[in-house]
Image: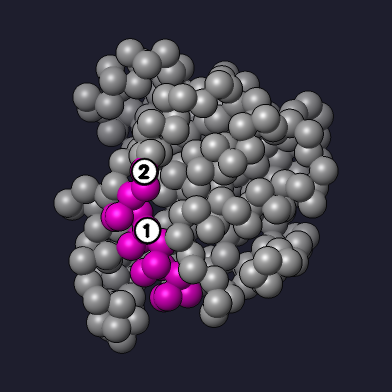
Amino acid sequence: MKEFLVPTVPGILRYNDFPGEGVPILFIHGLGCAGSFDYPQVLAQSELKHAHCVAVDIFGSGYSDQPENFGYSVEEHASSLQQLVSHLHWDTYTVFGHSLGGAIALSLANLDRKKVSSIILSEANLDASPEGSTSKFIADQSQESFLAKGFLQLIEESRSTGNTMWAATLSHWSPKATYLIAKSAAEGVTPSWREILYTLPCKKTFIFGERTLPTPEYQELSSQGIEIQVVRDAGHSMAWENPQGLAQAIAKAL
């Protein structure tokens, strides 16, 4: 694992750098997850093992710092990752984002339009979080209530319903970071992440888990000229459910 001190925060981002060839790929995980947890098995697959990939833990998650003075909004995460990319001296790169990490990826691509050659999204947040989503459930609580009891209750509920992988990664998050990024997701941005996606000049791919289908989003995104890939035998947590299938979808997108 490597680390980079983001000077504007300040705080240290930690990431795994898998050496390889071609245009590098930055992997951005979703809410309650971690790049160090989600992607090693995906990147070990034959389809990606020769690619240059970086899997980062965003601030407040995994092994990265949990700076108190960081705002943890989608846009602030994107800014910190743009500084990481600059530190890595990448002239061009692909950005991959899963779930809420997709919103961060879109914000980053919007900041780095001249450098991002393609964007790959797996069931990414494109609009403000709707009713029924985890981020909306978190954001509907007060910050005080969530920090006092909501965070631990969410972990315990995930364990009790069999979502033990997510409970494991979420337990390593800062409760404050969890709440603030969920609040950012629920509030959305203007222009929306969807509008950003539609106007990006780079190659664009959206990945669905087979168990998520059918969804109107499939036709909507196809109508916008966005390439669609489907991971068989997987739902939203495709990196855990079918890492080889996700690796194949990413390789096809490249």
| Residue at the extreme bottom of the image, as rendered | 148
Residue 33's spot in the image, x, y percent? 48, 57
- Quadrant into which the C terminus falls: top right
Q: Secondary structure at mark 2?
A: loop
Q: Which residue in the rendered view is the most extreme toward the left? A: 131
**Whole-percent x, y for residue 198 in the image:** 42, 24
Task: Report the residue at 33% width, 28% height from top.
Answer: 210
For this orientation, the residue located farthest to the front is 190
x and y, in percent, of residue 98 in the image: 46, 43
Please tell me how crowded label 2 is: few (under 14), some (14-19), or many (20+) other residues with Cα within 10 Å.
few
Q: Residue at x 29, y 70 (%)?
A: 154
The disc at residue 190 is 2
**Which of these two is toward me, 50 or 136?**
136
Q: Main secondary structure of the magenta part?
A: helix
Query: Label 2 is placed on what type of residue?
Result: Thr
The residue pinned by badge 1 equals 184
The quadrant in which residue 92 appears is top right
**Picture quarter containing residue 183?**
bottom left
Numbered circle sitting on residue 164:
none
- Among numbered discs 2 and 1, the one appearing first in the sequence: 1
- Image point (28%, 20%), residue name: 220
139 inside magenta stretch: no
Residue 17, percent from left and from top: 75, 49
Specify start and end residues of the magenta stretch as a single range: 174-190
**At numbered mark 1, what does the secondary structure look like: helix, strand or loop?**
helix
Q: Is residue 179 magenta?
A: yes
- Relative to 99, say whether 61 is above or below: below
Q: Is residue 218 left or right of residue 75?
A: left
Q: Inspect the image, locate mark 1, and give the three-letter code of the amino acid beneath it.
A: Ser
